[in-house]
Amino acid sequence: GASQPPAHDRLFVGPIPNNPQIIHTVYNTLISKVTLFGNIKIVTMNKEPIKILLIEPNPNDARLIKDYISQINKVINGAVPTYRLVLSERLEVALAFLAEVKFDVVFTDMNLPGSRDTAFLKQVQKASPDTPIVVLSSTIDANLAFQAAKSGAQGYLSKGDLNLDKLKLTLDQVLQHKAIQTDIDRKLAQKTAELEKRNLELDAFAHTMAHQIQGLLGHIIGYTSYLEMHYAPDMDENG
């Protein structure tokens, strides 16, 4: 049969079919290999590829980013892929796919069909709250970048001056930020669990002490009543 292309050229999948059942079947292998990265060292070295979802209706722009990702994979690990790129041409299909697969980062064009301004970014964020979003714009617009950040984006790239180094730098930055945030969240959850455990122990201790004090008070009252009943006539005001 025909020879297989290099591994890094077999990673680009797209566009995604607009059928949830087909999505589940075609990407079953990808789904089964999903790994959550809770370690800060995952940025450039990891056993499983880092999964990138690209939402891009322009085939030329999609091809350019695919080529950059392939080059990054060649430089870092040769035939062992570091990044796995999946393409969706439409937002609604990408949202359906985000519900099935845990991606590590989402790259999205700012001018998606049927979308206005940056409001659609909140849909992406809602579909996958922990996944960093990088927006791709045809122009350098500080106001647009600010609005994108307010809507949940962690990165902003201008297509006009996009190159391999900028794409790799942005990937490293957003993944480092995600890894750091994951580590902070893990430590915070651990501390919260420890505090909750200590609160339960304090509650149990307080309950035990209250029960013991109540018992002691009962004994004191009982002895006082006994003394009053039997020795009250013989006792002065000082007892």
Image (cartoon, rainbow, N blue to C red):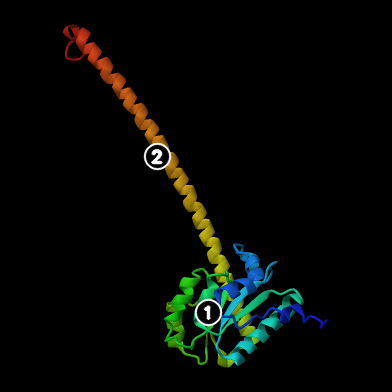
Give coordinates of residue 53: x percent, y percent: 58, 78
Counting the numbered discs, the total is 2
39 lies above or below 24: above
Choose the circle earlier in sequence order: 2 or 1.
1
Residue at the location (44% across, 85% down)? 115
189 lies above or below 43: above
Q: Quadrant of the C terminus?
A: top left
Distance between mark 2 and mark 1 Cα atoms: 51 Å
Crowd around label 1: few <14 · some 14–19 · many ≥20 (10 Å): some
Name the residue that disc number 2 marks. 203
- In the image, taking residue 28 as reference, residue 114 lies left or right, namely left
Q: Quadrant of the N terminus?
A: bottom right
- In the image, taking residue 107 as reference, residue 152 lies left or right, namely left
Q: Secondary structure at mark 1?
A: helix
Name the residue that disc number 1 marks. 93
Residue at the location (69% across, 78% down)? 11
Instruction: Tell me whether the residue at label 2 lies in contact with that at label 1, contact meaning CB atoms closer than 8 angstroms.
Output: no
Give coordinates of residue 181: x percent, y percent: 53, 65
Give coordinates of residue 206: x percent, y percent: 38, 36
User: Does residue 152 appear anywhere in the picture?
Assistant: no
167 lies above or below 43: below
Residue at the location (24% across, 11% down)? 227
Type of residue at label 2? Answer: Asp
Crowd around label 2: few <14 · some 14–19 · many ≥20 (10 Å): few
In front of the other: 225 or 86: 86
